[in-house]
Image: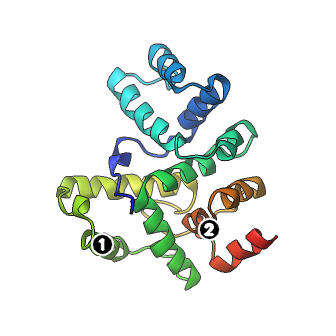
Amino acid sequence: MKKYLLSYTAASLLPHETQKVAELYLALQDWKRVDAEVLEHNVLQKNAQSTLKREYSEIKKRLKNLTVDELALYDEGIDEKYITFLACLKTYRLIYEFCSEVLREKVLLFDEQILPSDYVSFIESKQAGAGELNTISTVTEAKLRQVMFRMLVEVGMVDSVKGMRISVPTLPRVLISAIIEDDPKWLRGFLMSDRDIQDYVEG
């Protein structure tokens, strides 16, 4: 099974910046040329070169996990936050599992409120079977939680870091179709029930 990649602490969702990089790649079709363009011309408009390099590294990692069809959606006027969050679900196993196993289960039980204990129990259950999660510091663990919830707020699946109420996103049909072509399981990361997923697969 894929290891837990924890580098998302380096960059939150960044949907607008990710769209800029995606559009560059769609135009150039060459990551080396995109690297040069982004880093030489500060395409992400960051004040520090170190921030630019750090955030671009994560954005590139995420975009490389999208299929050709999913990536092409950046050029189709769809809300970029959904495509970008899909890229994050596919890149960071911990985020996908929290959404599909904790948030989705709560929604299915008509429970919209996230409690601090929900996240603590989730992390403890994952630490039992993953060495990379057992060696992280308390500071890193807090950062993982902070950035994950910031992403969830940015994509609209959580109302606010204080409110912690879950909201199921309404995805564009063209994005749902691209995900089904790829692997329907990713729709669980958007809190979709298995029955709804099956309906889309058969429809």
Residue beneath disc 2: 168
For the residue labelled by badge 2, is the local secondary structure a helix, a strand or a loop? Answer: loop
Tell me which numbered mark, 2 or 1, is placed earlier along the sequence: 1
Answer with the quarter of the image where residue 18 lies.
top right
Of residues 175 and 31, the one nearer the viewer is 31
Residue 32 x %, y %: 49, 22
Residue 190 x %, y %: 59, 64
Q: Is residue 72 something that shows in the picture? A: yes
Q: How is the model colour-coded? A: rainbow
> What's the residue at 77%, 58% (across, down)?
173
Residue 115 x %, y %: 39, 75
Relative vertical location of residue 53 with respect to residue 160 in this rendering, above or below: above
For the residue labelled by badge 1, is the local secondary structure a helix, a strand or a loop? Answer: helix
Residue 169 x %, y %: 64, 63
Residue at the limit of the structure toward the right, as seen here: 203
Q: Is residue 161 something that shows in the picture? A: no
Q: In the visual, does 53 lie left or right of 89?
A: left
Quarter of the image with the N terminus is bottom left
Which numbered dot is residue 201?
none
> What's the residue at 40%, 26% (across, down)?
52
Q: Residues within 10 Å of mark 2 (few under 14, many from 20)?
A: some
Q: In the visual, does 104 lie left or right of 2?
A: right
> What's the residue at 76%, 40% (across, down)?
76
The Cα atoms of the two marked residues, 2 and 1, are separated by 22 Å
Quarter of the image with the C terminus is bottom right
Answer with the quarter of the image where residue 118 lies.
bottom left
Tag 2: amino acid: Val
Q: Residues within 10 Å of mark 1 (few under 14, many from 20)?
A: few
Tag 1: amino acid: Val
Q: In the visual, does 172 lie left or right of 136?
A: right
Of residues 149 and 94, the one nearer the viewer is 94
Residue beneath disc 1: 120
